[in-house]
Image (cartoon, grey):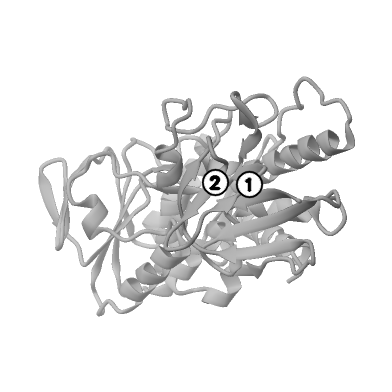
Amino acid sequence: MKKLVVLGGGYGGMRILQKMLPSELPDDVDLILIDKLPYHCLKTEYYALAAGTESDHEVRVPFPKEERLTLHFGTVDSIDKDNQLVHLRGEDPISYDYLIIGLGCEDKYHGVPGADTYTYSIQSMEKTRRTYEALNNLPPNSVVSVVGAGLSGVELSSELRESRDDLYIRLFDRGETILPMFPKRLSNYVQNWFEKHEVDVISNSDITKVEPDGLYNHEEFIPSDAIIWTAGIQPNKVVRELDVEKDDKGRILLTNHHHLPEDENVFVVGDCASLPHAPSAQLAEGQAEQIATVLKKRWRGEELPNRFPPIKLKGVLGSLGKKHGFGVMGDTALTGRVARLLKSGVLWMYKHHSGV
């Protein structure tokens, strides 16, 4: 029997399982998923778990239960491409014939002293739980600093405002305008929401140091009772240490068929892959579907296309608490309740198709 091993049950890994099961695997191929946790986590909703507006149960989905699927729970320490082995912490290695690396990303601290030690995170379920505990145990009138005003920072800050109206919340933005990747009208809408709800957006910030009781913006010390870091991501440590060619962000360079140039049986999906778009759940799912197509065509002896069509992204939706939102769908900018309802609907559909 040959082994198809999937590392990571995130959005890409989950879509691989859905495309292979229950009947798309050849009789001589076993499918093994390796993940730290016994369920798929909805990473796009971690901000709500951290803020205390969603329960742990609401941000996870069970993995499929199929005879052809083996679930192995453990932590990946390294990948030995030469011997086709995945080394696990405290366990015997697992061999593979086909490997799909979907280990996701971690916080990137940009060399800021103290950032990795004194800040909280929403990049993993374990870290988000610690962030939830820290934020919701803060006494009234505490100061919370959120570093990074991208989508995660904006959603976390707004959700936390609705969860804890007694807190002083500061959102640090490196740019002059919040969410510059969105249309100006949409950016202004988000800025106005924060002004109305008394979230202090600090533009043109440069966090130079983090200490246990606060941070330095440029040279000014700002006391903080909790600091959450949402100011950048990088590929998982296992991928960073893998001896393969990468782009300037540390993501792995791939062929048109999403495998390593030197090994057609090792694929990379999601945040660790060098792709023309910013990492997202949609992108990981689209890429996973193409990887599944490559494998199934190979197994059937069918010819592969020279390249796949570009992965189409439907748009980006963000929340401002439970009642308001923003986003772009196609060429249309959306704000207010409609955007928030659309985001809730997308989440409901995802859970529904995942069997929840």
Toward the viewer: 276 or 91? 91
Q: Quadrant of residue 205?
A: top left
Q: Residues within 10 Å of mark 2 (few under 14, many from 20)?
A: some
Q: Is any part of residue 328 visible from this angle?
A: no
- First in residue order: circle 1 vs circle 2: 2
The image shows residue 195 at horizontal and vertical percentages of 37, 55
Residue 149: x and y in percent read 39, 47
Q: Nearer the viewer, residue 139 or 36?
A: 36
Q: Which residue is mark 1?
A: 96
The answer to whether marks 1 and 2 mark residues whose Cβ atoms lie closer than 8 Å is yes
Left or right of 235 on screen, residue 324: right
Q: How far apart, in angstroms, are the residues tagged by discs 1 and 2?
A: 6 Å
> As shown in the figure, which amino acid type bears the numbered disc 1?
Tyr
Q: Say what secondary structure mark 1 lies in.
A: loop
- Depicted 265 relative to depicted 197: above or below: above
Which of the image's four quarters has the C terminus?
bottom right
